[in-house]
Amino acid sequence: DGGITQSPKYLFRKEGQNVTLSCEQNLNHDAMYWYRQDPGQGLRLIYYSQIVNDFQKGDIAEGYSVSREKKESFPLTVTSAQKNPTAFYLCASSINRDRANSPLHFGNGTRLTVT
Amino acid sequence: AQSVSQHNHHVILSEAASLELGCNYSYGGTVNLFWYVQYPGQHLQLLLKYFSGDPLVKGIKGFEAEFIKSKFSFNLRKPSVQWSDTAEYFCAVNGGFKTIFGAGTRLFVKA
């Protein structure tokens, strides 16, 4: 079955450490996205990538970095510069960067706790 | 800038009651509108979408939504809810390359 795999499901880190969240998809989708979900705030876009080796900042990119070296993979690094990193992180993909009506397919998420 | 506003953060209904969740968006151009649902312990999934044609769209599990362009609204409805509809519902809009979500509405259906 095709889908999006995020790992790990739960992640704990000490303040001041960088941490990388994994996202892999086997849907052959062009576009990939990272969202952060906080209670009462919905999903906020961190970064998105429409094609390999290209990505754009979303609405809350500060303190995060990404790479898109392969079509299947879009890892997110939460750096020590992110002031409030504890959150639920969702990775998503869509079939085609040029089709705004393409729905998003989501992974199961990674819950990051920084203490 | 695009934005999405969902009117209710928490809704509690009894089984068989009718449901309407409000969603308004702000965007000047052509938009594509979505409702996503997140059942407890599951990943977000598409409930229904609108991008052109009939403004009344039907989705899975008996849900429907009506696009009213003049009101910038895309409200979600279901005539009779079930306990299994307990979930969080997100309205979303895409006018270009990125999808913007509302804050979500948590629905709890009492058996």
Image (cartoon, rainbow, N blue to C red):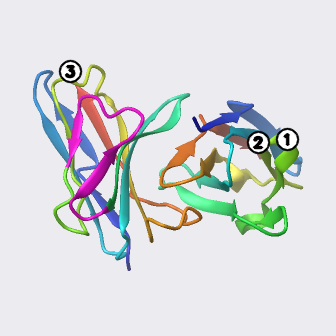
Classify mark 3: residues with Cα within 10 Å, few (<14), some (14-19) or many (20+): few
Classify mark 2: residues with Cα within 10 Å, few (<14), some (14-19) or many (20+): some
Where, quadrant-wise, is the N terminus of chain A in this rendering? bottom left
Which of the chains bears the disc numbered 3? A
Compared to residue A14, the image places residue B34 above or below, namely below
In the rendered structure, the answer to whether residue B110 lies left or right of residue A18 reads right
Compared to residue A110, the image places residue A92 above or below, namely below
Which quadrant of the figure has residue A18? top left
For residue B71, the mark is 1
Give the residues in magenta: A51-66
Which of the chains bears the disc numbered 1? B
Secondary element type, mark 2: strand
The residue lying toward the viewer, choosing from B32 and B66, is: B32
In the rendered structure, the answer to whether residue B39 lies left or right of residue B24 reads left
Compared to residue A98, the image places residue A59 above or below, namely above
* Residue on which the image places disc 3: A115
The residue lying toward the viewer, choosing from A111 and B71, is: B71
Q: Earlier in the sequence, mark 1 or mark 2?
A: 1
* Residue on which the image places disc 2: B110
